[in-house]
Image (tube, rainbow, N blue to C red):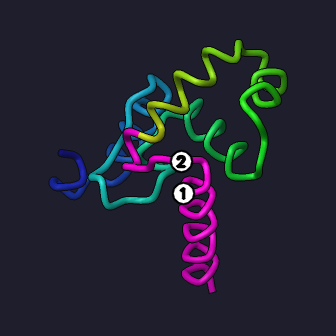
Amino acid sequence: MFSLLGVECWAEQATTELRAAGESIGPPDLPAARLLTGQQLRIAELVAEGATNREIAARMFLSTRTVDHHLRNVFHRLGIRSRTELARAFTAERHVGLASDR
């Protein structure tokens, strides 16, 4: 709503606070970072790097069941069915991000 009204400073603040509360922000066609909560994003990044659920759990001080729960939600939100698809999506997203930074 703030964006529609042209009040970008308030839109950014609202987005920051909603993400901190665990809400996903933005329409589905946006990058994964805008669709996932912070915890989900970190888990997805670690999966994309090749870490197992057990390794992620140890690194983030979580149970493997918690990691599995978050990962299922990541798959659902991104419309992905496998760890391989997730890795590809994050690799593609990084390449697009690098290209737009130039």
**Which residue is the extreme one toward the bottom?**
102
Q: Which residue is mark 2?
A: 82
Q: What main secondary structure does the magenta stretch of the protein show?
A: helix
Q: Residues within 10 Å of mark 2 (few under 14, many from 20)?
A: few
Task: Say whether marks 1 and 2 touch (CB < 8 Å).
Answer: yes
Residue type, mark 1 in image: Glu
Please give the name of the residue rendered at 24% of the width and 54% of the height, measured from the top-left corner: 3
**Residue 61 is one of the magenta-drawn residues:** no
**Residue 101 is one of the magenta-drawn residues:** yes
Q: Dividing the picture into quarters, in which one does residue 35 lie?
A: top left
Mark identifier at residue 85: 1
Q: Residues within 10 Å of mark 1 (few under 14, many from 20)?
A: some
- What count of labels does the image hold? 2
Q: Where residue 7 appears, x then y in whole percent?
A: 27, 52
C-alpha separation, residue under disc 1 versus residue under disc 2: 5 Å
Please give the name of the residue rendered at 46% of the width and 37% of the height, measured from the top-left corner: 16
Q: Where residue 37 appears, x then y in whole percent?
A: 49, 34
Q: Where residue 20 appears, x then y in whole percent?
A: 50, 28
> Of helix, strand and loop, which one carries label 2?
loop
Identify the magenta region. Answer: 76-102
Q: Tell me: 46 left or right of 31.
A: right
> Of helix, strand and loop, which one carries label 1?
helix
Quick one: 18 or 10, which is closer to the camera? 18
Q: Quadrant of the C terminus?
A: bottom right
Q: Where residue 72 appears, x then y in whole percent?
A: 48, 31
Q: Dividing the picture into quarters, in which one does residue 65 lie?
A: top right
Please give the name of the residue rendered at 30% of the width and 53% of the height, measured from the top-left corner: 28
Residue type, mark 2 in image: Ser
Quick one: 70 or 102, which is closer to the camera? 70
Please give the name of the residue rendered at 77% of the width and 24% of the height, measured from the top-left corner: 60
Q: Quadrant of the N terminus?
A: top left
